[in-house]
């Protein structure tokens, strides 16, 4: 999966688009020193979004923004989760 684009929205949220879900904007919010998914505006033209997809999206955005260290330090971090950067 690849992060295609991202931009700040109202109240410092981030709207991101990913190549595997091109019609479903993902809204992130900041908590402490990292970003997490607040909601996915899922479009039926895209495949269903799985939990592993959500985790990968969070990792990709936090890597992009330089907040991955904070993301790794959260309680729910699963070090076995992988990202594919291709």
Image (spheres, helix red, strand yellow):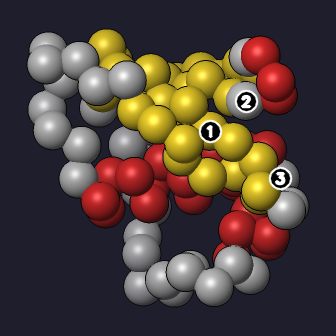
* Number of numbered callouts drawn: 3
Q: Is residue 60 visible?
A: no
Alpha carbon separation for disc pair 3 and 1: 15 Å
Q: Is residue 63 visible?
A: yes
Alpha carbon separation for disc pair 1 and 2: 6 Å
- Viewer-nearest of labels 3 and 1? 1
For disc 2, the marked residue is 13
At which x and y percent is residue 43? 23, 18
Q: Earlier along the polypeptide chain: callout 1 or callout 2?
A: 2
Q: Are marks 1 and 2 in contact (CB under 8 Å)?
A: yes
For disc 1, the marked residue is 28
Above-or-below relation of 20 to 33: above
Label 1 packing within 10 angstroms: few (<14), some (14-19), many (20+): many
What mark, if any, has residue 66 been given in the picture? 3
Label 3 packing within 10 angstroms: few (<14), some (14-19), many (20+): few
Residue at 46% x, 37% y: name it.
39
At which x and y percent is residue 1? 38, 43
What mark, if any, has residue 37 been given in the picture? none
Residue at 44% x, 56% y: name it.
56
51 left or right, relative to 61: left
Q: Earlier along the polypeptide chain: callout 2 or callout 3?
A: 2
At which x and y percent is residue 50? 23, 53
Alpha carbon separation for disc pair 2 and 3: 16 Å
Judging depth in this view, the residue of 61 and 11 nearest the camera is 11
Instruction: Quarter of the image for the C terminus: give it.
Output: top left
Residue at 42% x, 75% y: name it.
81
The kind of secondary structure element at disc 1 is strand
């Amino acid at each position: 999966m690849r992060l295609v684009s991202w931009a700040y929205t109202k109240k410092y949220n981030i709207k991101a688009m990913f190549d595997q879900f091109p019609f479903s904007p993902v809204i992130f919010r900041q908590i402490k020193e990292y970003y997490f998914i607040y909601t996915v505006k899922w479009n039926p033209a895209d495949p269903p979004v799985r939990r592993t997809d959500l985790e990968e999206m969070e990792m990709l955005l936090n890597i992009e923004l330089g907040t991955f260290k904070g993301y790794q330090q959260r309680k729910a971090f699963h070090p076995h989760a992988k990202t594919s950067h291709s």
